[in-house]
Structure formats: structure tokens, C-alpha cells
């Protein structure tokens, strides 16, 4: 007997027939003698609509009220899923984040999980009940305010719950049957990976791969939670996210990821003096605006240009902060561009192989694609390009690194 957390994303619970399918899959595991906890997202499209309403009312809305609105989608789904399970003879009960409770920090809209008090859930599971837990949401202690964990936060809920419950595995059910070398909708020759390391998956998730949320992989790596990604609609083997030691063959490049959710900000003619970067990025950090790629030009005539990227949804907030600080920062001009895409190549084999970056640059050059910004890490190279070249760039790189299926 194993203890399993089963997480179902928005497409897996998009309508009543799919919720019945979820109930059948959960029943199969229960009938096999396993203890099961279920985590569900909101129905497909629901969260997007709720977010849209908030943004239409006010682009700079109160994040606490935003969380109250967008957390409602999961409340509907947990109730329906519990009803569906009861209808097929499985004892089940729904749980909102505050009922578990899932305790978070106070960063509304992108809260971090601090602690899950899972004793009551474990007790219920040992008695044969299936807890159906709302993904994406938690509780800010002290103020008793609902928080949400950011887009894709149900993955984080599931992994955190698996760690708190000492689960043997966390199964993430989605609309794809595993983790691929790149998006198969762009590259039909993309290959499914049997296994991928936590570190590689973390990099891929952080640079745009939509299969798993970044922080869920980070937590899985830290807590050593074995994660399996598999299809809600087909009975096929999935892809396992595991420790690097479990992977025999370590490819140079495991995958190509892209992110359209980027915006480029350039501050022209910034006074080139000590502390200027802190004065630019400090207020952005205080407002929970995440800054990614950063490039500073060589100073000339006492001035420099500073270019960096933020999430596209954070661009209005970032622009507002920087424009209000223009007198203090004394920069000449702010230029924003949301029509960009970040393309990344990732692989643990990069540690021991030279020439990965040059292969990337040549492949893009051969296709006439200009690189705007470059950033690297030990197992990743990322570039920023014009959004119009996204698909061409992904296909060219997938072929250049020999990832196309035969």
C-alpha cells in the first residue's frame, strides 16, 4: 500500500464528464489499496476569466482582493469532485486551503507555502477517506486572509501536500502524457522523456515549460518528492522527475523551452555610479516584481543603459514604480517592449561539454534571428528574441541539438 497525492489540472476537470473521469481514476487507486489525497485546479478557463475581471476593473488592483476573487474557482471544483467520488462509492470530503490549513507568507498573488498542518488529513486517509484539496490557495496567518500561490500554483499545492503527508509519490495529471524535449505543438518530432532530473526540470519550468510550475519543482527537489507527469485522458506511462543519480544517460541538452510571458524594460542614460542598481531593483523587489535577465552596458560620459526583463503581467506595475522614481534615479528615458520571447536550452550535460552556447548562437544566426539579451547558468543558456521568431527559433534549436525523433 502506498500513499499517493493525485493532482488534476484545469483541462482534467473542465466539465462534468472529465470530473467523472477523475473520480474513476481516483477510485482505481483506492480500490488497489492505496491511501489517496486529491488536489484539483479550477475548471479550464475559469481562473483566466476571474483574473481578467480584476484587471479590467483596475490594472493596479489590491492583491488581497484579487486573491479573494481568483481563489473561488478551486472551491467549485473540490465540491464537484467530492460529489463525483461519493457517487462512485468512494468516501470523500472537500477541503479549502484555509481548512487544511496551508499556511503561506503574505505575498498575495504569488504567496510561498510556509507550512502545511497535515495531521488531520493523514488521520482521515488512514480511516479510508479521500481528501479533495483546493490547489492554488492558502492562508495568511494572523490576518486570516486567503492567499494564492501564483499561476500554476496547484502543482505547488500538490507537491507541498505530498511532502507534508510523507507521500510515496505525487502524480500530476494533465493534458499531455509526459515531459517532452520541447512543445510538441511547435515541433512534431519532440520526444517524450522517461526521466528528467529535478535540476533540469527546475530550469525548464523557470524559463517557460508549462508542464510544471517552477516552485513545485523546487520544493520537490528540496523535499525529495518523486513526481510523475502523466495524461488524464490516456493510460500511458508518464515521465518521472527524479534525482540526477537515477539517470544513467546524461544528455548534453535535454530540452528547449520558451516563454512568451516576458517584457523587456530599458532605462536609458542612467547615471553610472555605485548603488544605482540597488535603487532600481530594490523598489521592484519590494512590490514583488520578479526581475529575470539583466544587462548593463559599459558606461559612457557618466551614463549607462540598464536592460532587464519582467513578467509581462508585471510590466504595468514595474513601469509605474520606475516612472514615479524617475526624479530620484535621474534616468533619461524608459522603453518597454512586451513583444519578446525568451528561448532557453537546458541540460545537465552542459557541465562537461563545451560549445553549447556557440551552437545556439549559430543556429539562430543561420535563421536570421537577432539576439537581444543573453543569460547563462551552469546547465542553461537563455536568449531574448522578437516574439515573431518564437516558433522558428524553437524548431531550429531542437534540430541543432539533435533532439528530433527519428
Image (spheres, rainbow, N blue to C red):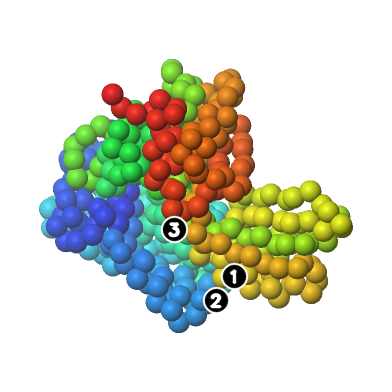
* Horizontal relation, residue 239 to residue 63: left or right: left
Residue where numbered disc 1 is placed? 317
Give the vertical position of 225 relative to 250 (above or below). below
Tell me the quarter of the image containing the C terminus.
top left
First of labels 2, 3 by sequence position: 2
Give the vertical position of 302 relative to 214 (above or below). below
Q: Position of residue 152 (x, y in %)?
A: 41, 54
* Horizontal relation, residue 238 to residue 260: left or right: left
Q: Position of residue 135 (x, y in %)?
A: 38, 57
Mark 1 touching mark 2, by CB under 8 A? yes
First of labels 1, 3 by sequence position: 3
Would you identify the image quadrant in which residue 16 lies?
bottom left
Can residue 322 be seen at all in this image of the molecule?
Answer: yes
The residue mark sitting in front, 2 or 3, is 2
Mark 1: which secondary structure?
helix
Residue where numbered disc 3 is placed? 151
Can residue 37 be seen at all in this image of the molecule?
Answer: no
Residue where numbered disc 2 is placed? 60
Amino acid at each position: 500500500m502506498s500513499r499517493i497525492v493525485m493532482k488534476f489540472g484545469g483541462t482534467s476537470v473542465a466539465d462534468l464528464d472529465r470530473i467523472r473521469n477523475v473520480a474513476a481514476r481516483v477510485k482505481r487507486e483506492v480500490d488497489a489499496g492505496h491511501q489517496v489525497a486529491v488536489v484539483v485546479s479550477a475548471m479550464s478557463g475559469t481562473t483566466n476569466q476571474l483574473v481578467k475581471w480584476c484587471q479590467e476593473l483596475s490594472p493596479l488592483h489590491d492583491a488581497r482582493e484579487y486573491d479573494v476573487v481568483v481563489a473561488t474557482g478551486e472551491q467549485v471544483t473540490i465540491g464537484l469532485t467530492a460529489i463525483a467520488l461519493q457517487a462512485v462509492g468512494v468516501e470523500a470530503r472537500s477541503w479549502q486551503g484555509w481548512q487544511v490549513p496551508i499556511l503561506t507568507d503574505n505575498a498575495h498573488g504569488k504567496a510561498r507555502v510556509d507550512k502545511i498542518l497535515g495531521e488531520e488529513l493523514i488521520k482521515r486517509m488512514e480511516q479510508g477517506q479521500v481528501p479533495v484539496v483546493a490547489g492554488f490557495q492558502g492562508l495568511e496567518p494572523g490576518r486570516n486572509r486567503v492567499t494564492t500561490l501564483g499561476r500554476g500554483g496547484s502543482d505547488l499545492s500538490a507537491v507541498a501536500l505530498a511532502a507534508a503527508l510523507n507521500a510515496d509519490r505525487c502524480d500530476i495529471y494533465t493534458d499531455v502524457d509526459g515531459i517532452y524535449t520541447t512543445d510538441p505543438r511547435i515541433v512534431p518530432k519532440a520526444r517524450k522523456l522517461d526521466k528528467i532530473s529535478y535540476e533540469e526540470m527546475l530550469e525548464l519550468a523557470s524559463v517557460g515549460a508549462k508542464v510544471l510550475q517552477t516552485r513545485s519543482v523546487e520544493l520537490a527537489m528540496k523535499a525529495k518528492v518523486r513526481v510523475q507527469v502523466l495524461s488524464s485522458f490516456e493510460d500511458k506511462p508518464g515521465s518521472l522527475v527524479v534525482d540526477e543519480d537515477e539517470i544513467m544517460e546524461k544528455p548534453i541538452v535535454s530540452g528547449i523551452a520558451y516563454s512568451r510571458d516576458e517584457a523587456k524594460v530599458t532605462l536609458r542614460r542612467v547615471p553610472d555610479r555605485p548603488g544605482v542598481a540597488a535603487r532600481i531593483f530594490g523598489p521592484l523587489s519590494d512590490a514583488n516584481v520578479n526581475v529575470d535577465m539583466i544587462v548593463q552596458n559599459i558606461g559612457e560620459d557618466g551614463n549607462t543603459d540598464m536592460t532587464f526583463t519582467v513578467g509581462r503581467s508585471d510590466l504595468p506595475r514595474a513601469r509605474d514604480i520606475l516612472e514615479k522614481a524617475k526624479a530620484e534615479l535621474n534616468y533619461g528615458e524608459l522603453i518597454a517592449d512586451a513583444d519578446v520571447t525568451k528561448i532557453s536550452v537546458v541540460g545537465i550535460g552542459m557541465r562537461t561539454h563545451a560549445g553549447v552556447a556557440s551552437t545556439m548562437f549559430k543556429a539562430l544566426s543561420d535563421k536570421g534571428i537577432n539576439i537581444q539579451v543573453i543569460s547563462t547558468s551552469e546547465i542553461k543558456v537563455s536568449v531574448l528574441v522578437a516574439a515573431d521568431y518564437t516558433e522558428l527559433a524553437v524548431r531550429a534549436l531542437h534540430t541543432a541539438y539533435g533532439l528530433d525523433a527519428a
